[in-house]
Image: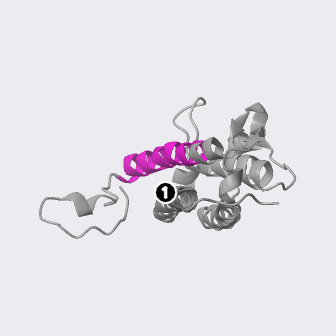
Amino acid sequence: MTPPQLPEVTAIHQAFITAAVARLRQQESRIHDCLQRLNEDQVWARGNENSNSVGNLVLHLMGNLGQWVVSGLGGQPDTRDRDSEFSTRSGITSAELSARLRARMDEVIAVIEAVPAHRLLAILSPQGYTLPVLELITHITEHFYHHGGQIVLLTKLYLNVDLAYYNHLKSNNTQHTETIP
């Protein structure tokens, strides 16, 4: 039986879930943009053997989200092959990576949006870490932004372009196109 919720708990829960989903979708759109701009060689290029390619980072994000959210939070079987996320060197086009990421994100968002307020403090143990659902959602959002930022940086380095994600902050522009920074 679901415990009754106080209005302020419901409002906090909804604000938290809405913010997490918005942040994930924002960074997802930037990753899709980067994948669209890069050619296949750039998607799989590595600076050295201790670096990851954009393709590896996308595979890693999909694996992490599957393990932590789809499996850990959503209860689906854990089918992650973490080693292949980093050992893959080619063979998946940027369009296919983008399509796979979009499908994974749709799964992830559906699971997160279905989390009821009373479950935010429930304890889970994905990947051997023990933490409440609230922290799990915070962690995966941070993790997604961390590696998404690496993808953005690599794209800027490979293409020598301003991706214009922050044009709304230029001094002459008072119209914000994004709702969160």
Q: For mark 1, does the 10 Å Cα neighbourhood hold few (<14), some (14 to 19), or many (20 or more) residues? A: some
**Nearest to the observer: residue 11 or residue 97:** 11
Residue 77 highlighted magenta (yes or no)? no
> Which image quadrant is residue 76 in?
bottom right
Q: Please state the horizontal and vertical placement of residue 63, each as a whole percent of the image.
A: 72, 49
Q: Secondary structure at mark 1?
A: helix
Residue at (27% x, 67% y) in the render = 176
Amino acid identity at mark 1: Arg
156 on left or right of 67: left
- Image position of 21 with respect to 134: above or below: below
- Image position of 22 with respect to 71: above or below: below
Q: Please state the horizontal and vertical placement of residue 129, each as a whole percent of the image.
A: 73, 32
107 on left or right of 21: right
Q: Which span of residues is magenta-colored?
A: 139-159
- Outermost residue, top side: 50
Q: Please state the horizontal and vertical placement of residue 69, each as a whole percent of the image.
A: 71, 52
The prevailing secondary structure element of the residues shown in magenta is helix
Q: Please state the horizontal and vertical placement of residue 26, each as a whole percent of the image.
A: 47, 61
**Nearest to the observer: residue 31 or residue 15:** 15
- Outermost residue, left side: 172
How many marks the image carries: the answer is 1
Q: How is the image coloured?
A: one colour
Residue at (80% x, 44% y) in the render = 81
Quarter of the image with the N terminus is bottom right
Which residue corresponds to mark 1? 23
Residue 151 highlighted magenta (yes or no)? yes
